[in-house]
Image: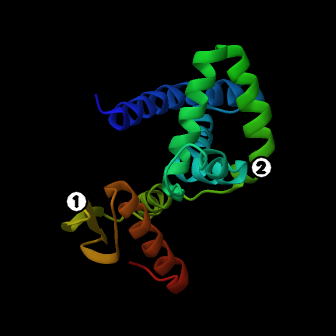
Amino acid sequence: MNSGHSGNSNNERLEYLGDAVLSTIVAEYLFQKYPNKNEGFLTKMRSKIVKRKTLNMIADKMGLDVILANYTAGRMSHSMMGNALEALIGAIYIEFGYPKTKRYVINKILRRFLDIHELEEFDDNYKSRLLEWCQKHNKAINYELVSRHKIDKRDRFRVAVCIEGKSFGESEDFNKKSAEQAASKIALGKIISTDSEV
């Protein structure tokens, strides 16, 4: 049996479990921290915390790459660090159960490495903001797949955001949603800088 494949499969299973446990802990933490906030606010805050970019940043601050360097061949890429954090949470959950995992996540991760109040103000969901702007100004918006090609056997997507049939930004990424977010950021930048009607 190929032990490398088995190890990778096991890590993916731990990531899957850790992702679910983390999402539950964060949901419960926010529910108790913000007793007067509505479901929309809580959902948006949870997505800010559990998204890949935030988890990569937390894992980096924790020095997970240094810890795992003893067990892996080669340096871990920044984009993989959030996966490693999820796997760690999954492993803690299996070993110690939910209450101890919850205490660890809240005390050793959320409170130590996140500024929750800064997150309240910060909104990098550019697609959502652009959709809100278009709805407010009664503008038609759609996302078009410009191209799709492979780099190192991975699909790469180039996406354009069009407002009233006119392209306002293009971007590409290995993830279609990420490409849409980046294109939306470009479009918002153009709208804000020109302050002109579309």
Q: In which quarter of the image is residue 154?
A: bottom left
Viewer-proximal residue among 90 and 43: 90
Residue annotated with mark 2: 115
Residue annotated with mark 1: 153
Viewer-proximal residue among 11 and 119: 11
Residue at x-position 80% and y-position 43%: 112
Pointer 1 local density, CA inside 10 Å: few below 14, some 14–19, many at least 20: few
Please say if the residues under marks 2 and 1 sit with CB atoms less than 8 Å apart: no
Pointer 2 local density, CA inside 10 Å: few below 14, some 14–19, many at least 20: few
The relative height of residue 57 versus residue 34 in the rendered view (above or below) is: below
Task: Locate the C terminus by quadrant.
Answer: bottom left
Going by the numbered disc 2, the residue's amino acid type is Asp
Q: In this view, does 48 lie to the left or right of 31?
A: left
Question: Which element type, helix, strand or loop, lies under badge 1?
Answer: loop
The relative height of residue 193 versus residue 122 in the rendered view (above or below) is: below
Going by the numbered disc 1, the residue's amino acid type is Lys
The relative height of residue 69 versus residue 127 in the rendered view (above or below) is: above
How is colour applied across the structure in the image? rainbow
Residue at x-position 54% and y-position 41%: 84
In percent of width and height, residue 124 lies at: 56, 59
Q: In this view, does 158 lie to the left or right of 180?
A: left
Residue at x-position 51% and y-position 32%: 19
State whether residue 151 appears in this view: yes
In percent of width and height, residue 32 lies at: 74, 24
